[in-house]
Amino acid sequence: MSSTVLQADGVLKTFSGVRALDHVSFAVGPGEVHALVGGSGAGKSTLVKVLSGVYRPDRGELRVGGERVRFGSPAEARRAGIATVHQEGNLVPLMSVARNLFLGREPRGRFGLIDFARLHAEADQIVRSYGMPLDVRRPLGSLSPGTRQLVAMARAAWADARVVIMDEPTSALEPGEMETLFRAVARLRAQGRSIIYVSHRLEELYRVCDTVTVLHEGKVVHTGGLAGLDRVRLVSLMLGRPLHQHRPLPEEPGPAVLPLLEATGPTRQNVRPDVSSALHEGQVPGLGGLLGARRGETARAMPVVGMPLLRK
Ligand SMILES: Nc1ncnc2c1ncn2[C@@H]1O[C@H](COP(=O)(O)OP(=O)(O)OP(=O)(O)O)[C@@H](O)[C@H]1O
């Protein structure tokens, strides 16, 4: 019995001489949320398309549950339990949420007619289990883009997927909907399903993912646990170069650390905001306040008057 649910070994995919995937190996285990990251053009979409049967690799192999597979189409990948949630693709806006959730698998009664009572009851159970309070009889197209995205995810997961591939799943979501998505991800993981999570948003990767594979120019440059991987290191891997690290400054700079700019009670055109400020090397100051708090006046007064002390 294989401990990986989906695996790619030495996958090569070229487009007119460009190596979109250069001998890529990748594996996701049961109940694992695996982040797939990389800069623009790194090969993420191409790998997702190979794993979901859209592209055939030029070389290399795919395995599902340890068994060698060759996907001739996305439908074959879906039959093998690989579901992809691309925005709300594959759904029908004019149909109800319930019909969309069960598209092609509607419960049928006598004479082969759709059993709407059962359809609605089961659909209602599904959306409630994901914490989505919505009327499953409503047409999908009348919902917000975020809710449509969540329905697409629920459909993919419900359809007995072993691996759910989520491509930038939060791009269209409101903050409240993001929480619903994260709960849904946790639920899928608890059921032993695997998730491949493609996103540029580091915050959410660290929140929901267990493992990460970083692609750069078509090659895997790192794969492993995410929790122990420092963010600066992760971004460096994605960029393919070390990130310029800045020296952390002491919280209270001592007398030896002179400020670059110091302003004590600056005044401008009879406006004297009661503000003193010092700017040290490497700092990015924020200036906060409500409307009318004279943020603009204060910022404009800083370099003009007061006691600016500039150091080379
Ligand atoms: N259908 C295609 N025809 C030609 N070149 C392609 C095709 N698909 C991808 N490529 C090339 O393969 C490389 C990898 O592209 P891919 O879209 O997989 O990267 P990505 O990591 O998904 O990038 P992004 O985050 O910008 O979408 C790029 O150089 C891209 O130009």
Image (cartoon, grey):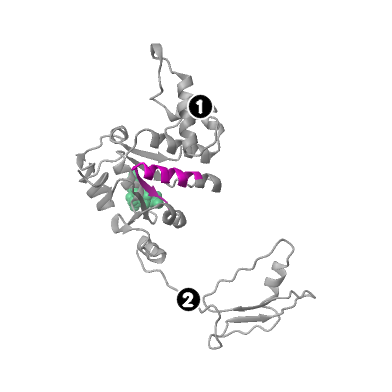
Residue at the image point whose x is 55% and y is 46% from the top: 176
The magenta segment: 180-200
Counting from the top left corner in percent of width and height, residue 53 is at 29, 38
Task: Give the distance between the C-alpha atoms of the residues marked 2 and 1, in whole angstroms.
Answer: 54 Å
Q: What residue type is labelled 1?
A: Ser
**Based on the displayed image, in which of its 4 quarters is residue 277 positioned?**
bottom right
Look at the numbered disc 2 and give the secondary structure of its residue.
loop
Residue 248, numbered label: 2
Q: Can residue 89 be seen in this view?
A: no
Q: In this view, does 258 lie above or below 185?
A: below
Under 8 Å from ligand 1: the CB of mark 1? no
Counting from the top left corner in percent of width and height, residue 13 is at 26, 47
Counting from the top left corner in percent of width and height, residue 259 is at 58, 82
Counting from the top left corner in percent of width and height, residue 147 is at 52, 38
Residue extending farthest to the bottom is: 256
Disc 2, disc 1: CB below 8 Å? no
**For mark 1, does the 10 Å Cα neighbourhood hold few (<14), some (14 to 19), or many (20 or more) residues?**
some
Q: Is residue 193 magenta?
A: yes
* The C terminus lies in quadrant: bottom right
**For mark 2, does the 10 Å Cα neighbourhood hold few (<14), some (14 to 19), or many (20 or more) residues?**
few
Q: Is residue 234 visible?
A: yes
Q: Is residue 7 above or below residue 158?
A: below
Q: What residue type is labelled 2?
A: Pro
Judged left or right of residue 43, residue 282 is: right
- Please name the residue that numbered disc 1 is placed on: 96
Judged left or right of residue 121, residue 212 is: left
